[in-house]
Image (cartoon, rainbow, N blue to C red):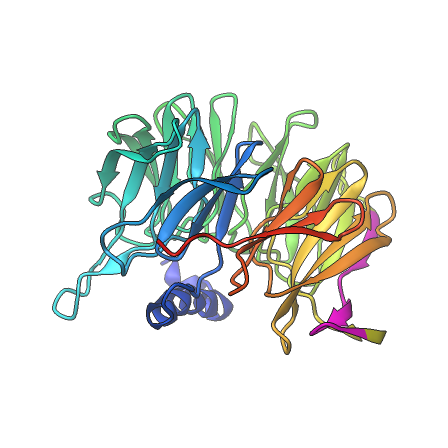
Amino acid sequence: MFIAKRPYSRLMILLLLLATLVLTSCGRGATAANWPGMSTDGENLYVAYGPGVFGIEAESQDLLWSYRPENAALFFYAPPSVENGRAVVGDFGASQGMFSPQTVVSIYGFDVSDSTVQTLWTRNDLAKDRIVAAPLQVDGVAYVATADNLLLALDAESGNELWRFAAEFSIWARPTYYEGTLFVASLDRHLYALNAADGSKLWAMELSGAMSAQPIVNPDENLVYAASYDREVHALDMDTGNEVWSVMATDWIWSAPALADGTLYFGDSSGNVFAVDAANGDLIWQSSVHSMNMVAGVTQNPPLEIKGAIQASPVVQDGVVYVASLGNSESEEGLLVALNADNGDELWQTTTPAPLFSDPIINGDVIVVAMQSEAGILYAYDLKTGNQEWIYQPPES
């Protein structure tokens, strides 16, 4: 049996953490306890946070639209998917009360094309457990991963189910689409390749660790990369699933690597950052985010040594790797670091008011990070200097 042969101690800790984040937020008023999930269409930013979902125009920070369900007990965690004026988002579920322990999870389709929210459809009969991963929209189909082991293919306009695929355990990672194939990573330790048209399995490769990171495809090398809790990034043949090479980190890898100019960049939960050759996995450099120059507004001389655990995916642009970390656990501040993509040298760093769990997003000349902070949930920093440019806090209603 699957459960009998896999150790789940750290995995269960994370499951409990996700549940606790939602449960503890119920008594905090406007400030939710879960960290925000953020996405972009290149122009606007879309955020799922606490009891609602909203979109803002990134340059002006003007609120475009917002949605809050009538059930105030619902919370949103997974980043929204917005394509062609249509948003698809799943909630984190809500208990039906003391006498009905079942959690009801809903998936929503919204028309947000004119800066208002019009509900296209709602489905609460598909998923029976949390939605952690961002949905993926391709050619009018929304692919939604669930914690009850499913990948659902839905008509994005109507919400009608087209097909479903069942893994052996939860799917926390957003699927990746390439030329008619979906690559799906699961906590059951398998990377799956599925026919996007009907959900049929093309191949499945079992690795030695669970995966919560989105697979990354590299068509130039015919490789798909899977980051795993076994402390490795695995490079698999896109056609067969056979492993071509793997590279070891120092701790669990929670997030997807970033691919840029033939190099693969990734970080681990001990705060180490790696750059490897995307073709063969050879190490190019190793760096870290283990020191913090500013803590609680006070300059540290020498810098404070921290673990700097990395849960978010790095972002690469114009020869710079941007790494968001959980930072300093004692002061509960996060850390955003810019590294030279060629050698891993630090270019700048900035301390953030809260730990950074979500993937950063580059928009124009700023990098935006999302966090759970009473001052604001979106912070934008200048790409070249790390100077803070703006803060955004959504209205309470």
Residue at 50%, 40% (x, y): give it.
62
Main structural element of the magenta stretch: helix, strand or loop?
strand
Residue at 48%, 26% (x, y): give it.
181
Residue 148 visible (yes or no): yes
Q: Residue lying farthest left?
A: 99
Q: Position of residue 275 (x, y in %)?
A: 78, 47
> What segment carries the magenta color?
284-299
Residue 7 visible (yes or no): no
Q: Is residue 292 above or below residue 186?
A: below
Residue at 24%, 34% (x, y): give it.
121
Residue closer to the observer: 225 or 146: 146
Q: Position of residue 386 (x, y in %)?
A: 76, 52
Left or right placement of residue 273 versus residue 310 in this view: right
Residue 120: quarter of image: top left
Q: Position of residue 391 (x, y in %)?
A: 59, 53
Left or right placement of residue 33 versus residue 148 in this view: right
Residue 109: quarter of image: top left
Left or right placement of residue 12 versus residue 95 in this view: right
Residue closer to the observer: 210 or 318: 318
Q: Position of residue 134 (x, y in %)?
A: 45, 43
Quadrant assignment for the N terminus? bottom left
Left or right placement of residue 132 versus residue 288 in this view: left
> Any magenta on residue 281?
no
- Label count reads 0
